[in-house]
Image: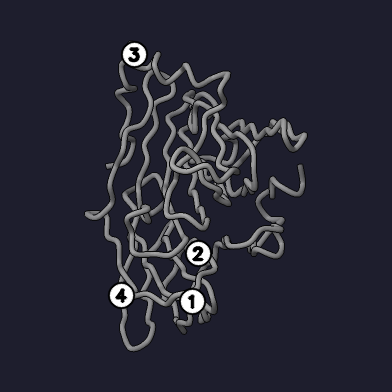
Amino acid sequence: MSELLLPAGTWQEVTPESASWRHLSFAVRTGPYTAESGDFELALVPLSGRFRVASDGASWELGGRDNVFAGLPWALYLPRDSSYSVEGEGELAICGARCDRRREPLLVSPDDVEIEVRGSGNATRQINHLVKPEFPAERLLVVEVFTPSGNWSSYPPHKHDEDRPPGEVVLEETYYFRTPAPEAFAVQRLYSPRHGLDLTATVRDGDLLLVPYGYHTTAAAHGYDLYYLNALAGDRRSMAAADDPALAWVRAAWAELEPDPRVPLVR
């Protein structure tokens, strides 16, 4: 479990080398800093606070929400081989993926964010699309997910560890969890009969889950809404995933249920 679920305070950055995969990196930083993107394309996502980012003679202002539950997100895409500096106070998530080609920087404002209400009944959740497959990036994909208290998310359990397009593609993924109070928690299951894995764990504010393979799903404990930031990367520009065949019937059952009226949680 310690290799895949990283509790808050025990990690600073995940790299392809530390995760034993090929493309994806993830980190959270606070306050001003200067860095190089190297051979990674990046998406900078303010979790709280406001920032000014300068790179290659251009600058952008982004952020402004007090916390992840207080507003829609901003994101700044920076290409590989970029020097950049960040000014401001708050928390900034840095999602990255190794890539081959240098593209153009691009700012995503809250007005650009596509909000999707997915599922129904107590499996209703909100997806904020930041870096979609249609986005002009090479490998990186980024979404925010809000799950109302007591609801299931990433359900039915699904996986993306086999290259069988268009129904499934291989994607490395991280789940970065935030809760509105320190006592709040969620339950995460990650399992793969093929790899001999069956992990069910309590996740709390600031924990990070690595998903190299396997079916995965999340449930928010009653009383507290749940946020997680997903970063994904693969060789195909797709988010196609395969449901657990034993639970795939759930999708058809949603037609008989009303979506949870609490969603969208954040507008």
Residue 60 is labelled as 4
Residue 243 is labelled as none
Task: Select label 1 or label 3 by which is in front.
Answer: 3
Residue 24, quarter of picture: bottom right
Element type at marker 4?
Answer: strand
Element type at marker 1?
Answer: loop
Query: Mark 1 or mark 4: which comes first in sequence?
Result: 1
Residue 48, quarter of picture: bottom left
* Residue that numbered label 2 is attached to: 94
Q: CA distance from mark 2 to mark 3?
A: 37 Å
Indicate the position of residue 239 as horizontal and vertical percent values.
44, 46
For this view, does 32 lie left or right of residue 246? left
* Residue that numbered label 3 is attached to: 257
Query: Mark 2 or mark 4: which comes first in sequence?
Result: 4
Residue 260 in view, yes or no:
yes
For this view, does 238 lie left or right of residue 104? right
Mark 1 near mark 3, Cβ–Cβ under 8 Å? no
Whether residue 240 is situated above or below residue 104 in the rendered picture: above
Q: Nearer the viewer, residue 140 or 205?
A: 140
In the image, farthest residue toward the left = 111
Which residue is drawn at the image coordinates 46% and 68% (left, top)? 42
Looking at the rendering, in which quadrant would you find the N terminus? top right
* Residue that numbered label 1 is attached to: 32
Query: Mark 2 or mark 1: which comes first in sequence?
Result: 1
